[in-house]
Structures are given as C-alpha cells and as structure tokens.
Image: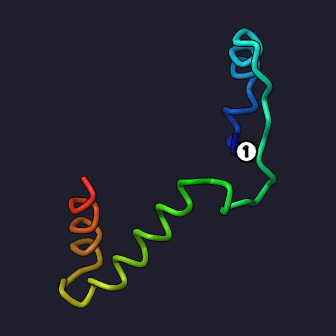
C-alpha cells in the first residue's frame, strides 16, 4: 500500500489481519510503484499538448477528464 494515513490505521490493520493477509507498504516516495502516478503524468502531458486549443487551463483540464471517461 502507499503511505496514506488511513492505510496505517488500526481499523485497516485489523481488516488486513482478519483476511489473513500481510500488510506491505511502498517506500515513502515511489511513484514508479504507484499506478496513479502514471495516470497523473499521462494526464498532465495530455493537457500540455492540448492547452493551446483552450482559453483557460480549467477548460483544458475539463476536456482532458471528459476524454478519458
């Protein structure tokens, strides 16, 4: 798991233990092991590519999100 605070809660630890699983954490900063980091990197690259077609950054972001839904 990543190092989000709720992943380290007693409730999470209990759920994992009850499922007879082992809780393993990623190193503190490991974007290459966290799939969401690749998504954000790709999204930012796409926005940089299309931003010239929009009047605002918000417009480009909205378009980018709509295109992946």
Front-most of residues 53 and 68: 68
Question: Left or right: where does residue 11 sit relative to residue 37?
Answer: right
User: Where residue 1 sits in the image (x, y, percent)?
Assistant: 70, 40
Quarter of image, res 22: top right
Residue at figure coordinates x 74%, y 14% from the top left: 14
Image location of residue 69, percent across then percent down: 24, 52
Residue at left offset 28%, top offset 61%: 65
Left or right side of 34 for 47 = left
Q: Position of residue 9 (x, y in %)?
A: 74, 26
Visual colour scheme: rainbow
Q: Is residue 37 left or right of residue 10?
A: left
Which residue is under mark 1?
3
Query: Which quarter of the figure has residue 56?
Result: bottom left
| Element carrying mark 1 | loop
29 vs 47: above or below: above
Asked if 38 appears above or below 20 in the picture, the reply is below
């Amino acid at each position: 798991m990543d190092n989000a605070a709720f992943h380290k809660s007693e409730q999470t630890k209990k759920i994992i233990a009850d499922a007879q699983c082992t809780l393993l954490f990623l190193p503190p900063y490991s974007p290459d092991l966290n799939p969401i980091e690749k998504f954000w990197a790709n999204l930012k690259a796409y926005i940089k590519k299309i931003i010239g077609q929009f009047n605002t950054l918000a417009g480009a972001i909205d378009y980018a999100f709509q295109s992946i839904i």
